[in-house]
Image (cartoon, rainbow, N blue to C red):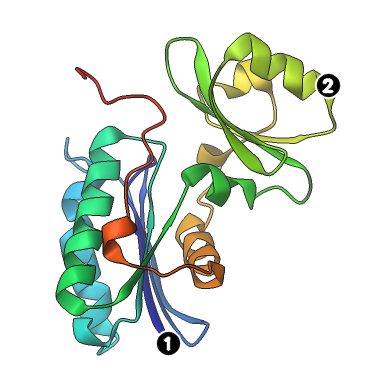
Amino acid sequence: MITLAFDTCLDKMYAVLKRDGNILSSRIVENKDNKYHSAFLISTLQEILSENNIKPQNINLIAVNIGPGSFTGIRACVTVARVMAQQLNCKTAGISSLEILAQLAKKNPLVALDARKNCAYLYCDGEIKGAVQLEKVQEIIKSGNYTVITDDKLKPLLGGISYQSENYQLGEILADLAEKKDDEGNWRKLKPLYIQPPPGV
C-alpha cells in the first residue's frame, strides 16, 4: 500500500510518502520569501514521488489535514487531495489538526490552538469541542490532569508544550492516523473542517 500524506494547514507544510508501513520520504517546508508554504505543495509532491520512482497512479491513499488552521492552507490541502483522488481513483482520508497534535501527548491530551476573538480551537477528552472562550479553556485545564499542546501565541496563557517549538514529524503522524481510519475513503466526502467561517463570510 502506498500512502501520500500532506498538510498545509499549520505553520509549516508536511509531506510524507509511505509504502507498506515504511516511510520513503518525509519533508517539512517553511514559508519562503513572502510565499506561503502551500505554494510549494505541488512541486514538493512531484519531487518525493519522482525521487522514489513512484507514479501517481500507484498511490492507494491520499491523507490530508482538514483543519482547523489557515483558511488558505485548508483550501489548498483539501482541493489538491480531492482533484488527485478523483483523477487517480484512490481513497482519501481527512484528519483534524487537533487529532494530529493530540498524538504529541503521552497521556490525556488537551489541544488548544489560537482561533482569534479570544477563543481557542479545543480538543480534549477524545473529541473536538469547537471554538471555546480562552477563560473556559483555562478552567478546563485547571479541572483535570491534562497534557496541554498549544501554539506559540497561547503558550504564555495556557502553559504546556507549543507544537511550534520543535520540528515534530506531524506529516508522519497524519499518515499513520489516516491508515488506521476505517471509512469508505471517497474523495467526495473529503471536506474542510471550518469550525469558524472563513474571513468575510
Q: Residue at x 78, y 34 (%)?
A: 146
Q: What is the x, y in percent for residue 10?
A: 39, 41
- The disc label shown at residue 102, or none: none
Q: Which residue, given by chain and number where applicable, does mark 2 sit on?
A: 143
* Element at label 2: helix
Q: Is residue 70 above or below residue 135?
A: below
Q: Residue at x 28, y 63 (%)?
A: 187
Given residues 112 and 179, the one toward you in this image is: 179
Q: Is residue 150 above or below residue 21?
A: above
Q: Residue at x 59, y 13 (%)?
A: 134
Given residues 176 and 127, the one toward you in this image is: 127
Which quarter of the image is occupied by the N terminus?
bottom left
Quarter of image, res 177: bottom right
Marks 1 and 2 sit apart, C-alpha to C-alpha, by: 43 Å
Given residues 155 and 70, the one toward you in this image is: 70
Report the side of 143 relative to 98 (left or right): right
* Element at label 1: loop
Q: Which residue, given by chain and number where applicable, does mark 1 sit on?
A: 1
Q: What is the x, y in percent for residue 115?
A: 44, 22
Q: Amino acid at mark 2?
A: Ser
Q: Amino acid at mark 1?
A: Met
Q: What is the x, y in percent for residue 152?
A: 52, 27
Report the side of 113 relative to 126 (left or right): left
